[in-house]
Amino acid sequence: MKFNIALLAGDGIGPEVTEQAVKTLDAIADVYNHTFKFNKALVGACAIDETGDPLPEDTIKLCQESDAVLFGAIGHPKYDNDPSAKVRPEQGLLKLRKSLGLFCNIRPVKAYERLIENSPLKKEIISGTDISIYRELTGGIYFGDKHISEDGQVASDGCSYSVEEITRIAHLAFKEAQNRRKKLTLVDKANVLETSRLWRKTVTEIAKEYEDVELDFLFVDNAAMQMILNPSQFDVILTENLFGDIISDEASVIGGSIGLLASASIGSTVGMFEPIHGSFPQATGKNIANPLASILSAAMMLRHLDLHKEADAIEKAVEKSLELGITTGDINPKKPYSTTKVGDFIADYITHPEDSNRNFRNIHAGQSTII
Ligand code: IPM
Ligand code: MG
């Protein structure tokens, strides 16, 4: 089959890691007889530098006309350290999510047995953890009215949610729970926030349609604590935009590195697939960033396009790289491999899964069997 993929590499390490995802998808295309046509477009700080706009119209148009969007990373320190900046790279990502109607962000978190010692958390605490976080992505405080007083002394960010916004993601999260361990935890702050009370009421109502799913509730402060005290209690977590942003970064510690966490953003039209990590400016251009989150995002993309055995092949190759220790310094500090070598190994393993020794030897010899 033929697919048009919008490639939005973005800032910092974005281009380096997405290059490995492209390499991986090219290997999949060869083995399974598909064509992936990658069309590049600008977003973020690089788009501001070139056009003055963090999300040029051309980029939105390209995404809308594509089968899927593969996204790298966004952000640049020159904006982080300048609160007075009028345009910011992140605005590009937020506008893109909104323009494409990507209201549901899915972030899987799992403790890979091979990496269990990498987490600063104790083995017995994280072992067996397998969570799917459903984060609402186009509402809440991220998109509420923003205000700063003329004298610059008072600022506000509004937070609002409608029943409709809650309902559409809640159904997706319940369906995911039905396909998993049949437990859904709503994370909110219903003891304080009106919006959270609306989430509870709405989700409780919807739960009647999913009698096989056990629904429970946690206040976000308690959820943050439970995430490191007893993460294996969670199956599907459903939460609003800001809480989901925070909880998912926290959960990444369980996996041993944020460089492993992929995400899918879906909604009304085309899906977008991106690592949850940022642009990691300190690593930019050094060929040391972990490409696995980007590669696993490509796997989520394939699954969304209904290419399940292809997605399985990528996930198997990632497991193999973890097993053999062909990984970057964040998870393999003693003997780190470069970003490109990890990408070469994954692509090579997809092409020759029967012979991992050969892939291993080739990587050691500094060459890939991909010609
Ligand atoms: C994420 C990121 C973004 C967010 C930033 C870059 C705007 O942290 O995808 O988690 O806050 O949503
Ligand atoms: Mg975040």
Image (cartoon, grey):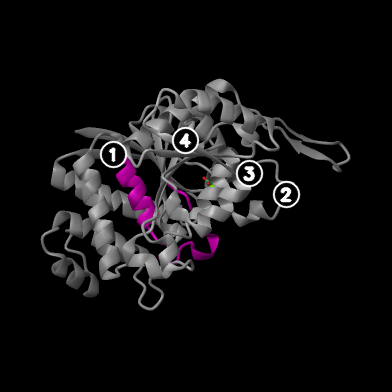
Residue density around tag 4, few if under 14, some if 14–19, many if 20 or more, within 10 Å? some
Which labelled disc corresponds to residue 215? 4
Picture quarter containing residue 70? top left
Q: Is residue 344 above or below residue 366?
A: above
* Identity of the residue drawn at 30% across and 46% down: 299
Quarter containing the N terminus: top left
Which labelled disc corresponds to residue 54? none
Given contact means CB atoms under 8 Å apart, are the residues at marks 2 and 4 in contact? no
Amino acid on which the number 1 mark rests in the picture: Arg
Residue density around tag 3, few if under 14, some if 14–19, many if 20 or more, within 10 Å? many
Please state which of the two labelled residues, at mark 2 or mark 4, is closer to the viewer. Answer: 4
What is the C-alpha distance between the residues marked 3 and 2? 9 Å
Task: Work out whether mark 4 precedes mark 1 in sequence or the reverse, and give the earlier one.
Answer: 4
Q: Is 291 colored magenta in this rendering?
A: yes
Which labelled disc corresponds to residue 83? 2
Task: Work out whether mark 3 precedes mark 2 in sequence or the reverse, and give the earlier one.
Answer: 2
Please state which of the two labelled residues, at mark 1 or mark 2, is closer to the viewer. Answer: 1
* Identity of the residue drawn at 14% across and 68% down: 358
What is the C-alpha distance between the residues marked 3 and 4? 38 Å
Given contact means CB atoms under 8 Å apart, are the residues at marks 1 and 3 in contact? no
Residue 223 visible somewhere in the drawing: yes
Residue density around tag 2, few if under 14, some if 14–19, many if 20 or more, within 10 Å? few
Amino acid on which the number 3 mark rests in the picture: Arg
Task: Work out whether mark 1 precedes mark 2 in sequence or the reverse, and give the earlier one.
Answer: 2
The part of the chain drawn in magenta is: 274-301
Mark 3 lies on residue: 88
**Element assignment for label 1:** helix
Which labelled disc corresponds to residue 303? 1
Amino acid on which the number 4 mark rests in the picture: Leu
